[in-house]
Structure formats: structure tokens, C-alpha cells
Image (cartoon, grey):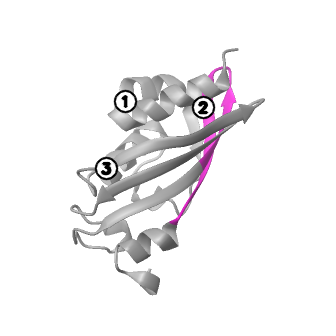
Amino acid sequence: MGNNVETVMRLENAWMVHDYGTVREILSPDFADRNHGVGAEMMPKGGVDGIIEGHEVGRSSYSDRKQEILDCFGEGDRVVVRSRMTGTNDGGLPWFGVPANGNKVDIEYITIYRLENDKVVESWAQMEIAKLMQQLGVGGQV
């Protein structure tokens, strides 16, 4: 068994550069996305392909999207990542009913990964949704 923190760092970096070959290598074919309410509703299908498609939909909302890892640590089969995402809403967020409006966003989120045999088998995430909506100018409408 390899180093789970290194595996998750490889996965996070692959997401940042849209290296879906590496994403497919690291995510288990029966990966379970437990991120209900954090973009899960924008994924038209399940499994790894659905996760990748959802990532592409989210990426299209911010042409200048940048992500950085602020913390990454783990113990046993769990790894926690705290990340920051910045970007300009020039593509809209249709799953939230938000049109493109040129607003800048700067939010953090935390993802917990569980691994088995060097593969990510499930994850959970919490994002600053209220802060995101405020920065997008929709306040309590969503």
C-alpha cells in the first residue's frame, strides 16, 4: 500500500490541470461521491465519468479558475484537503440558476477522501456555498 496523502495530492493536481487519465487511474471504478449539495446535482451521470463531466461543467463557469491546496494531511485510510478556488463567473452556474455576471469569487472548501488499495473509493466535501452565493450577488435567493 502506498502513501495515501501522496495519492490524493496526485489526484488534486490532476484535477487542477484536467489530467483525466490520472483521475481515472486514482479513482476506483465504483467511486462513491458523497458530495450532495456540492455540485452533485450538476452531474448528469454517476461514476467516474459523471465526476469528470461535472468537473468540466463547473470549470466552464470560471474561465480563469484557479485552485490551490492550502492543507493536506491524513491518517490511515482518510486524507483531508483544504483548498481555495478563485475565478470570475463568466459562464454562469446553471445548476444554481445563476447567470454569468462577471463577479469574482474566492472560496474555500474541504474534502475528505477514503482510500482502499491506493484507490480513492469515496469522498465528502463541504464548500462555502453561502459565501459563494454572496460573492455571486444572489444572497439568500438559492
Assign a secondary structure to mark 1.
Answer: helix
Where does label 1 land, which residue? Answer: 20
Label 1 vs label 3: CA separation? Answer: 17 Å
Residue 109 percent across, percent down from the top left: 54, 54
Please identify the quadrant where the C terminus is shown.
Answer: bottom left
Label 1 vs label 2: CA separation? Answer: 14 Å
Residue at left 62%, top 37%? 72
User: In this view of the protein, which residue sits in the foreground, 112 or 136?
Assistant: 136
User: Was residue 60 drawn as part of the magenta stretch in this picture?
Assistant: no
Please identify the quadrant where the N terminus is shown.
Answer: top right
Q: Earlier in the sequence, mark 1 or mark 2?
A: 1
Where does label 3 land, which residue? Answer: 65
User: In this view of the protein, which residue sits in the foreground, 31 or 62?
Assistant: 62
For the residue marked with disc 1, what is the amino acid?
Tyr
Residue 7 percent across, percent down from the top left: 58, 24
Q: Nearer the viewer, mark 2 or mark 3?
A: 3
Where does label 2 land, which residue? Answer: 120
Residue at left 33%, top 75%? 97
Assign a secondary structure to mark 2.
Answer: strand
Residue 135 percent across, percent down from the top left: 38, 72
* Residue sitting farthest toward the right: 76
Which residues make up the magenta segment? 111-128
For the residue marked with disc 3, what is the amino acid?
Arg
Q: Main secondary structure of the magenta part?
A: strand
Assign a secondary structure to mark 3.
Answer: loop
Q: Which of marks 2 and 3 is nearer the N terminus?
A: 3
Residue 38 versus residue 72 in the image, above or below: below
User: In this view of the protein, which residue sits in the foreground, 106 or 16?
Assistant: 106
Label 2 vs label 3: CA separation? Answer: 24 Å
